[in-house]
Amino acid sequence: MINESLARFSNYAIYGAMFVYLIAFLAYTAEWVFGRKSTFVVETAAAAKVPAQAQTEALVAVGGKGASAPEDLSGLDDLDDLDDLDDLDDLPTVEEPTQAIDGGNLRAITAGGIAVSTTVLGLVLHITGVVCRGLAAHRVPWGNLYEFTIAGSAVAMALYVGLLFRKNARWLGVFVTGVIVAILGVAMEVLYKDAEQLVPALHSPWLIVHVAAAVLCSGMFTVATVATILYLVKSHYETKAKLGTAKPNSMWQRVPSAMKLDLTAYRILAFSFPIWTFTVVAGSIWAEHAWGRYWGWDPTETWAFITWVVYAAYLHARATRGWKGRKAAVIALVGYGCFIFNYFVVSIFVNGLHSYAGVK
């Protein structure tokens, strides 16, 4: 029997989490607006004003080529070609600030404090809403697509809060909170379904381990994807900065280096990939118990396996010379695209043995 009071309280908690996350998003944005500029772009812009002869001499000195001229940049058709220029990569750069937002005035400090405190409060409300949903139905809170979504987004936010306090990753807050607000909005307005008992096919201990692993991966994949997108944008920005064409007041000067963003995404995906492997394996074992076969190429099974293959390709690419950086990042984005396609399109619009989304 469903506890309607707890079910309503769960809804209130999720709505409350959305509202508090929105406040956190605005506070993170204010912190970015009021924070001081990073020294990296300021000095890069100043270097662009040095006479051409002085820049030539500096490049020759760094390259150790004596009186020879530096590589000609006029033939570059794409900013990506700068990856092959050793001279530019060897130029001295200013150390990256260790703080999440470098300095800032009192308004930035105040906004940052509000952002962090509201993020933690939102996470408490979020987790409360997920737990109450399970208590209301007397089962685990991931029996349909709505519950899976609110649980997975809670994992994503918990991962960010962990990075926030362990790695001072406040720079990630404006992006993660914005994404989570959007996800919860879709969950409440599009995917929502009243709390109810599970369909008979889901009455199995494997629901706890198989779907729980998938929930964990959904949150980690989301945060890793945010970091990957930031890496691609920051990498492009740093390339423009080396050419002296970057805007000195751009917001991207306050984001950590492309190398740090790439490493953040890689570590999250390297940790989550074995869990996703377990998800696929546990699902096949459950399928044998439920349907008498380990694998039947059901649409959800197929796209889960495709997602596994793409992320495996990403990890392999990271270890392969010539496929690190931007190329590997694109593979990671393709993997998340496969995951989202399976998550929404297959679950909602494709009939199969995994059609438990509950969305009409």
Image: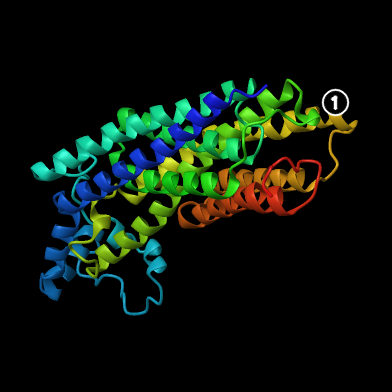
Picture quadrant of residue 12: top left
The kind of residue on which mark 1 rests is His
Residue 93, percent across and down?
21, 52
Compared across the picture, whether 16 is left or right of 254 comes to: right
Could one spot residue 89 in this view of the protein?
yes
Residue 121, percent across and down?
33, 30
Q: How many marks?
A: 1
Could one spot residue 322 in this view of the protein?
no
Q: Residue furthest bottom?
A: 74
Q: Badge 1 local density, few (<14 within 10 Å), some, or many (20+)?
A: few
Question: Residue at 82% of width from left, 32% of height from top?
Answer: 287
Picture quadrant of residue 141: top right
Question: Residue at 54% of width from left, 45% of height from top?
Answer: 187
Above/below status of 324 relative to 156: below
Question: Residue at 15% of width from left, 53% of height from top?
Answer: 37
Q: Nearer the viewer, residue 24 or 278?
A: 24
Above/below status of 281 relative to 109: above
Query: Which residue corresponds to mark 1?
Result: 289
Q: Residue furthest front?
A: 5
Q: Nearer the viewer, residue 227 or 147?
A: 147
Compared across the picture, whether 234 is left or right of 247 comes to: right
Q: Nearer the viewer, residue 129 or 39?
A: 129
Residue 89, percent across and down?
30, 57
